[in-house]
Image (cartoon, helix red, strand yellow):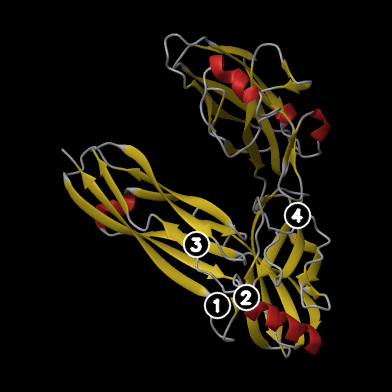
Amino acid sequence: MGRISKKKCLAAWFLTAVLVIFSTDAVGGLAVSPIKQWVEVKPGKEAYFTITLTNTIRDAQALPCEVIAEVVDFNVSPQGGLSFGEEQKHNRSAVPWISFEGRDFTFQPGESKQIKAKVSAPMNADGDYWAAIMVKLGGPEKQVKGIQVRLQTASGVFVHVARRNYIERGSIIDANLILPKFDSVHNPEITAADPNTPEAGQQAFTINVDLKNDGLTALNANGRVILYSGGKYRTASIPLYTHRKQILPGHNRWFTGVMAQSLPAGQYKARVVFESDIKHSRKITKDIELTVNEELAGKWAESFKDSKDSDVKAPAIEPNVINLTVTPGRLTTAKFLVDNGGLGTISIRCRVNANGSIKNWLELKSPEFTLSSNMRRNVICIVKVPQDAQAGQYCGTIEVEMEHSGLTDGKSSNIEKHNVPIHITVSK
């Protein structure tokens, strides 16, 4: 979101009624950092954390920025949407535990302040709890064409009360397969019960899965579907996409997988598999039987053959080389875009491959993610050059491993590997 001065806030008010999200750091010229954080505390003890508010408008003619900060409840929908307010109160709320001095703050142009907050955990607390620090631009609410408008953003606070070692627990509470449906003139249609199913293509095979977190701690789930024919022969692999991978205790999340290739006639078993980011965690699985009859297979193959968009397209990476010129002691970021122009879902895993000192200079932010059809996402690389770095040329590589949905040869996955070279010139 662009950073705008208070003089220009009215233009933003015409665009939106409420702005709250955990993926941006500024609203109305006010930057909030961090956007989310974890705080660990023992039962019956206290812990502290800070959030930093900065008026990013440095124009001396700009007006002071008036801010209201308060602790609020929030919840996450099965589709990954955020909802804030008292009506979102739940039994794992950390709102009563969080306190800080003050509520109303005034920021001069360019001024930055830290809010130090305290978490007081009850003796009987166990597992993960959450709340948000809601930051609103102060002053009276505006009326724009009959709409009451507030400009606000939030910093998520997730509290982990550690009593013991926790075992992640999850269950698949619903899963449904959607095969193409063809009319008499071979025009395929998708009839999806879930309105959030992406319109990936008329000949696509789609699976929707509802995963619930039954444990006491957050679950970061990576999902995929493996198709078997004849009961044991691996036929296809389909990564599963969701808007927010982190599932809080008691919450559930919808995942969707799309494959843009036709299936031959036969009996299949679709095995849904979820694995956590934590090593040695238990897999969550569910098997579903399905049948593709001869008539469907024929029309599906014909449609797939005739469609110009039916081929599995390799995701695009831009730029394919990163060049940076920095000075010693500099902290900056570099990024490249991964664009899924195909019809199926893909999963992305990135890692830094560098030797020597440069390996400690590079850090990838959110290096693993999944993209649905026609989605794109930036991969952010944080570059921190030490103060004592010698002038010269330094090179490394970001390895990008992509697994796309589609038919397999029965042994290997649909994985492609790409390299994004990164060249750093340290100047004197």
- The amino acid sitting under disc 3 is Arg
Residue 58 is situated, as x and y percent measured from the top left of the image, at 42, 17
**Real-space Cα distance between discs 4 and 2?**
21 Å
Label 2 neighbourhood size at 10 Å, few (<14), some (14-19), many (20+)?
many
SS class, disc 4: loop
Label 1 neighbourhood size at 10 Å, few (<14), some (14-19), many (20+)?
some
Choose top left, top right, bottom left or bottom right for residue 308: bottom right
- The amino acid sitting under disc 1 is Ser
**Real-space Cα distance between discs 1 and 2?**
7 Å
| Residue holding disc 3 | 349
**Real-space Cα distance between discs 3 and 1?**
14 Å
Q: Is residue 48 above or below residue 410?
A: above
Instruction: Report whether residue 102 is seen.
Output: no
Residue at 47%, 22% (x, y): give it: 56
- The amino acid sitting under disc 4 is Asn
Mark toward the start of the polypeptide (4 vs 2): 4
SS class, disc 3: strand
| Residue holding disc 1 | 413
Residue at 68%, 22% (x, y): give it: 70
SS class, disc 2: strand
Mark toward the start of the polypeptide (1 vs 2): 2
Label drawn at residue 237:
2
Instruction: Report whether residue 143 is seen.
Output: yes
Cβ–Cβ under 8 Å for marks 2 and 3: no
- Marks 4 and 2: which is nearer the front? 4
Mark toward the start of the polypeptide (4 vs 1): 4
Q: Is residue 160 above or below residue 149?
A: below
| Residue holding disc 4 | 196
